[in-house]
Amino acid sequence: MTSAALGNDTSAVEVTNVSKHGFWLLIGEQEVFLPFEQFPWFRDAPIGKLLNVQLPSSHHLYWPDLDIDLAVDSVFHPEQFPLVSQDNSRSVP
């Protein structure tokens, strides 16, 4: 008798910890820290929305509740992706 194939890998990506400085993301077997200073889009995100992360392909991260897409390379090698979004909500008129 053979066992049936298991379902899809649901833990291909997950947020493992959040602090006031950023959050840890586990992608497959690798864990990386995303500091809010380099990834400001996540700074004020509700935890539930931050935790809802998907890995549609091996090189693409997506947070559907936040409408944020990131290249996996950008989290492991942020120095190669120097552009950081401006957080306009904190600007003074």
Image: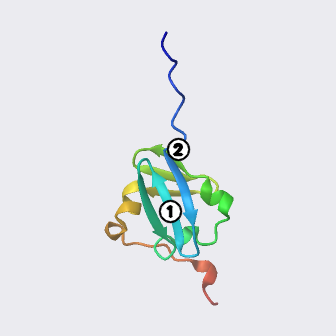
Question: For the residue carrying disc 2, how many other residues have a C-alpha within 10 Å: few (<14), some (14-19), or many (20+)?
Answer: few
Q: Nearer the viewer, residue 86 or 42?
A: 42
The residue drawn where x is 47% and y is 67% is 34
The residue that label 1 is drawn on is 24
| Depicted 83 relative to depicted 17: above or below | below
Q: Tell me residue 62's x, y (percent).
A: 53, 52
Compared with 72, 11 (above or below) is above
Residue farthest along the bottom direction in this orientation: 93
- Looking at the rendered structure, the secondary structure element under dot 2 is loop
Q: Amino acid at mark 1?
A: Trp
Q: Indicate the colouring scheme.
A: rainbow
Q: Position of residue 2 (x, y in %)?
A: 48, 13
Residue 24 screen position, x and y as percent: 50, 62
- Circle 2 sits on which residue? 11
Secondary structure at numbered mark 1: strand
Instruction: Please state which amino acid type lies under the numbered disc 2.
Output: Ser
Residue 92 visible in rendering: yes
Q: Residue 66, can we see it?
A: no
**Which of the marked residues, 2 or 1, is nearer the chain's N terminus?**
2
How crowded pointer 1 is (Cα within 10 Å; few <14, some 14-19, many 20+) is rated as some
Asked if the residue at tag 1 contacts the one at tag 2, i.e. Cβ–Cβ closer than 8 Å, the answer is no
Q: Residue furthest front?
A: 1
